[in-house]
């Protein structure tokens, strides 16, 4: 069994042989790619004449795990070569997706945590928001709609001379269009009764869940639509604690029902450590919405 370093050398030396002739004149490149809360080694291919493009990638770490699971180096290379070619030939219109017009019509927002994404944020367009940042995703077309995206980098912003204010405006509009209006439900309405007894002892059951209709990227509501928090606070007749349970939703608790902030923070950290995929963690913080002063980090 090869070590990771030995495997990387083998990829550098032999992987390209498993690709068809269309990749003959393309350069294989490896580079660190910072994804949500984690860095991976991307493997991609580019032509020397491509000034600005979006190239499909596979990840060295995923290839190595597949190799360890199968124990077959050639089979691993053959499977991932097929993946590269499928991604590449499905997406021959990269240049159509990096125009200002396309970006403005397909951009949407996502919240990420600053602490876990410091390196990632250096290269990507973002807006600071408390201990979070707003980043921008560009939806890509698929047969069943828009189920993939790419992240807007500062190089795209500079190359296309995009206007930040207009980009933010369109991103919020598109976010609501892609994922639907905000929804608030009591946590008891979505947790099966048989699971209630398994919840942590410190987990209050008076939580509400705030997300989108499609239950995707729902945490971004607290940035995009502050009036939603104002409406919820008014309806509940109370200030609010807000817990970032993932990038897809936040938990809301009436302030009068819980004053132990450290206990709430422990709940957030516990969920992040034990229940979430790394790329879905938003923050370990607790936020507070005051009817007088708005949203704040505790």
Image (cartoon, rainbow, N blue to C red):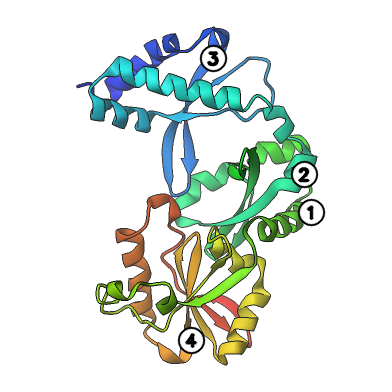
Near-viewer residue (49 or 173): 173
Do labels 3 and 4 touch, CB within 8 Å?
Answer: no
Residue sitting at x 25%, y 72% = 198
Q: Earlier in the sequence, mark 1 or mark 3?
A: 3
Residue 26 visible from this viewpoint: yes
Mark 4 lies on residue: 254
Q: Could you say whether the residue bearing mark 1 is in a helix, strand or loop? A: helix
Q: Is residue 233 above or below residue 69?
A: below
> Where is mark 3, residue-wise?
27
Residue located 59% across and 22% down the image: 89
Residue toward you, 167 or 32:
167
Residue 44 visible in rendering: no
Seen at 64% across and 82% down, the residue is: 231
Instruction: Report x, y in % for residue 209.
Output: 48, 73
Cβ–Cβ under 8 Å for marks 1 and 2: yes
The mark closer to the camera, 4 or 1, is 4
Q: Which mark is residue 166?
A: 1
Q: Examine the rendered structure and indicate whether residue 139 appears above or below residue 159.
A: below
| Spatial CA span between label 3 and label 2 | 29 Å
Instruction: Spot the residue most to the left.
Output: 1
Q: On the picture, is 210 further left or further right than 145?
A: left
Residue that numbered label 2 is attached to: 162
Residue 28 horizontal/vertical position (percent):
50, 17
Quadrant of image for the N terminus: top left
First in residue order: circle 4 vs circle 1: 1
Tell me the CA gap for discs 1 and 2.
Answer: 8 Å
Mark 4–mark 1 Cα distance, whole angstroms, equals 35 Å
Vertically, is 124 above or below 294? above
Above or below, 62 relative to 187: above
Mark 4 element type: strand
At mark 3, the secondary structure is strand
């Amino acid at each position: 069994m090869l070590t990771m370093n030995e495997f990387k050398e083998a990829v550098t030396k032999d992987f390209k042989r498993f690709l068809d002739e269309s990749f003959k004149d393309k350069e294989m490149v490896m580079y660190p790619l910072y994804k949500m809360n984690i860095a991976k080694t991307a493997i991609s291919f580019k032509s020397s004449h491509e000034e600005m493009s979006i190239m499909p990638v596979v990840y060295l770490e995923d290839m190595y795990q597949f190799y360890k699971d199968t124990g077959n180096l050639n089979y691993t290379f053959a499977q991932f070569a097929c993946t590269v070619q499928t991604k590449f030939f499905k997406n021959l219109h990269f240049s159509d997706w990096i125009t200002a017009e396309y970006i403005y019509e397909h951009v949407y927002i996502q919240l990420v945590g600053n602490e876990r994404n410091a390196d990632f944020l250096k290269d990507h367009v973002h807006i600071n928001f408390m201990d979070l940042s707003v980043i921008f995703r560009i939806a890509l077309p698929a047969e069943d709609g828009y189920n993939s995206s790419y992240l807007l980098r500062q190089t795209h912003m500079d190359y296309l001379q995009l206007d930040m204010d207009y980009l933010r405006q369109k991103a919020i509009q598109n976010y609501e269009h892609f994922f639907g209006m905000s929804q608030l439900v009591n946590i008891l309405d979505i947790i099966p009764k048989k699971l209630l007894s398994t919840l942590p002892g410190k987990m209050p059951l008076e939580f509400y869940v705030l997300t989108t209709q499609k239950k995707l990227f729902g945490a971004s509501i607290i940035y995009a639509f502050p009036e939603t928090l104002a409406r919820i606070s008014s309806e509940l007749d109370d200030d609010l604690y807000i817990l970032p349970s993932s990038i897809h939703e936040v938990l809301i608790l009436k302030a009068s029902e819980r004053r132990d902030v450290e206990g709430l923070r422990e709940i957030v950290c516990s969920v992040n450590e034990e229940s979430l995929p790394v790329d879905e963690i938003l923050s370990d913080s607790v936020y507070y919405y005051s009817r007088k002063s708005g949203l704040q980090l505790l």
